[in-house]
Amino acid sequence: MNADRAAPKVIVIAEGHLVGEAIEVALSARSFEIESIHCPRSRQELMEVRREISRFRAGVGLVVAEIDDLAQWRDALALVESIRMRWLIVTGSRDPARWGALIAAGCQGIVPMSAGLDVLTQALLAVSRGGLGMSPTAREQVLAEWERLGNSKRSLILRISALSPREWEVLEKLKEGLSIKTIAESGGVSEGTVRSQVRAIRQKLNVKSQLAAVAAYQQATELNLTHTG
C-alpha cells in the first residue's frame, strides 16, 4: 500500500468474537491500524465508545454483526444513529430492508460476509476517503426496500427491536394467553417484576394496553420478525 494512500485507523465492533478477531488480524496484516471495542448495550456504553473513537482518531467504524438477529440489527442501528462517523457494516444477512434501514440511518456501506478481504479492504478505503462502501445501485435498491415497508411497519419494526430478550419472552407468553401470575411462577420472579416488565414493554411499543402490546407482537411475527439474541 503506497505511503500516500495509507490505510485508515479502524474501530472494529464485533458481535461474534471469533469472526471479529479474524477480520482484525486480516486487516492488520494489510497495514490497517485496528482498535477493537466491545458492542455497547446501554447509553453509558455508547458514550464510552464515542470517547474511545475520539481518542483513537478512527477514520472508519466497522461493525461486524448478524443483522438477521433482531437485537444485533438494533444495536448496529443504535451505533450508526448515535455516533457520527463513517460506518461500514459486515454481515452474513441478505435482508435488503434491514440493509436499507442501516443506510437510511447514516451507514456508508454494507459488505456481505462472503465478499472476501479484497472487497472489504476496498470498501474501507473508499469510506475513509469520503466515498461509499457499496455501489450506488445497491444502495438505492436497499433504501427502496426499507421505504417500501411504509411508515407504520418501519415504526413497528424499530419499536419491537428495542425490546430486551426477557421482555420479548414475556410478550410471547402473554400472546400464548398466560397470566401474569403464571409468567412470574415460570420465571421464578414476583408478579410485581412481571408487571414492571409489561409496563416497560408498553412504553417501548408506545401502546396503552397489554392487549395492544400483544397485537403489536402478533403483527411483528406476521412480518417474520424474530428475536434470536
Image (cartoon, rainbow, N blue to C red):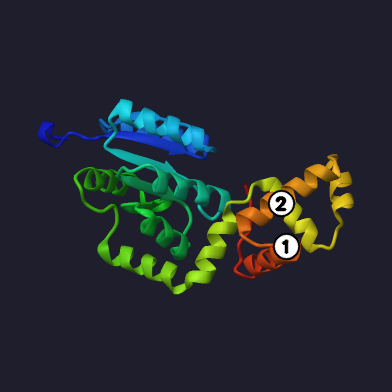
Residue nearest the viewer, comparing 128 with 30: 128
Helix, strand or loop under label 2: helix
Q: Kindly identify which numbered label has been placed on residue 199.
A: 2
> From the viewer's perspective, is residue 22 above or below residue 171?
above
Visible residue check, residue 70: yes
Q: Amino acid at mark 1?
A: Ser
Q: Residue furthest left?
A: 4
Q: Position of residue 33 (x, y in %)?
A: 29, 29
Q: Position of residue 9 (x, y in %)?
A: 27, 32
> From the viewer's perspective, is residue 1 above or below residue 201?
above
Q: Residues within 10 Å of mark 2 (few under 14, many from 20)?
A: some
Q: Position of residue 223 (x, y in %)?
A: 60, 69
Q: Kindly identify which numbered label has been placed on residue 184.
A: none
Residue nearest the viewer, comparing 92 with 85: 85
Marks 1 and 2 in Cβ contact (< 8 Å): no
On the image, numbered disc 1 is attached to which residue? 209
User: Residue at the location (63% across, 65% down)?
Assistant: 220
Quadrant of the rendering where the N terminus is positioned: top left
Q: State left or right for residue 225 relative to residue 90.
A: right
